[in-house]
Amino acid sequence: MTIRRPIESMQGQMYFGYDFPVYVNRASETFNLQEHSHDFVEIAYVAEGKGFHYIGDEIVPVRKGDLFYIPVGISHVFRPADAAVKEPLIVYNCIFGLELFDRIIRSHSLLLPSEDAGALLAVRSRTEWLKAEEQSADVRNLVQRLYQEYALRQEGRGLMILTYVVQLLLTLYRSTDGGYSRSTYADADSRIEEAIRYIQLHLDAPLSLTDISSKINIGKRQFNRLIKKATGQTYTDYLHSLQIESCCEQLRTTDRKVYEIAEAMGFKDMKHFHAIFKRKTGLSPREYRKRTV
């Protein structure tokens, strides 16, 4: 069963100053923020923890060191793997308007060879999201300096921020090798991709570990190893993360009773459901509904 997720629309004017359309923050991700699209560009960096990035029609496992480029109009939201305080999902976000992106490209076109300026134009022209996995501490250092520069408001702040933004954009461009071919589960067995697609489409009637591994013709042990490599979680934890996210959407957007939502997601034991929901979100279903509706 597929749940249609409501999408909030965000406008840059909510965040930008009058003459400098850039905003940078550091957020501890929760289950409260609604999935959203926006009229600005976003660079997001996962600094700590692990979880999931619901982006477009995909659910992408994320971990420390992942860098994303989200163009205008692509809906997305980050979710932690669970609500454990000891390992929160920390994400740095840098958002900026297309008009600033165009100004950056024009200024660099005057200063640099066409192929160098063309790298920025290639990212600007993208209509799909990008993901780069950090190979060293360079990206983390760049993002932290960008955040500090934005927060401290020292002289020359705007120019310093732009230099960091350009470096991040070029890092993303280099990750494409000039012609990006995205595979969300690039390191995983192709059969795991098939299993993950099945799991995401059948949250209301999940298969047991034995059945899902048999469905793709591999042993339970190998299945668990491969799915943890692809998602960062065991099969059961991954399934529960997706189920609880779907329950959260319904709690926010419908007036269905809690037990009806739980049963629709395949939970037959309400005590078990409440325990999983509390572990994943830090709240009971009723507390969650009160805070988010």
Image: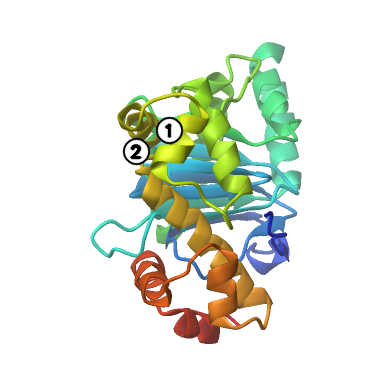
- Give the left or right position of residue 170, taking residue 213 as reference: right
User: The residue under label 2 is which amino acid type?
Assistant: Asn
Answer yes or no: is residue 29 visible: yes
- Give the left or right position of residue 92, taking residue 68 as reference: left
Quadrant location of the C terminus in the rendered image:
bottom right
Query: From the viewer's perspective, is residue 293 above or below residue 245?
Result: below
Determine which of the numbered discs, if any, sits on residue 230 in the image.
1
249, 223: nearer the viewer: 223
* Residue 197: image location, x then y, percent: 59, 38
238, 184: nearer the viewer: 238
Q: How many residues crowd around disc 1 within 10 Å: few (fewer than 14), some, or many (20 or more)?
A: many
Whether residues under marks 1 and 2 lie with C-beta atoms below 8 angstroms apart, the answer is no
State the residue at coordinates (44%, 33%): 213
293, 203: nearer the viewer: 203
Q: CA distance from mark 1 to mark 2?
A: 26 Å
Query: From the viewer's perspective, is residue 229 above or below residue 144?
Result: above
* Residue 259: image location, x then y, percent: 53, 79
User: In which quarter of the view is residue 220 placed?
Assistant: top left
Determine which of the numbered discs, if any, sits on residue 141 in the image.
2
User: The residue under label 1 is which amino acid type?
Assistant: Ala
Dot 1: element: helix
70, 288: nearer the viewer: 288
Q: Nearer the viewer, mark 1 or mark 2?
A: 1
- Give the left or right position of residue 108, taking residue 167 as reference: right
State the residue at coordinates (33%, 58%): 88
State the residue at coordinates (58%, 50%): 54
Query: From the viewer's perspective, is residue 140 above or below residue 283?
Result: above
* Residue 105: image location, x then y, percent: 71, 31
Query: From the viewer's perspective, is residue 75 above or below residue 101?
Result: below
State the residue at coordinates (36%, 36%): 228
* Residue 216: image location, x then y, percent: 51, 27
Mark 1 or mark 2: name the one nearer the start of the chain: 2
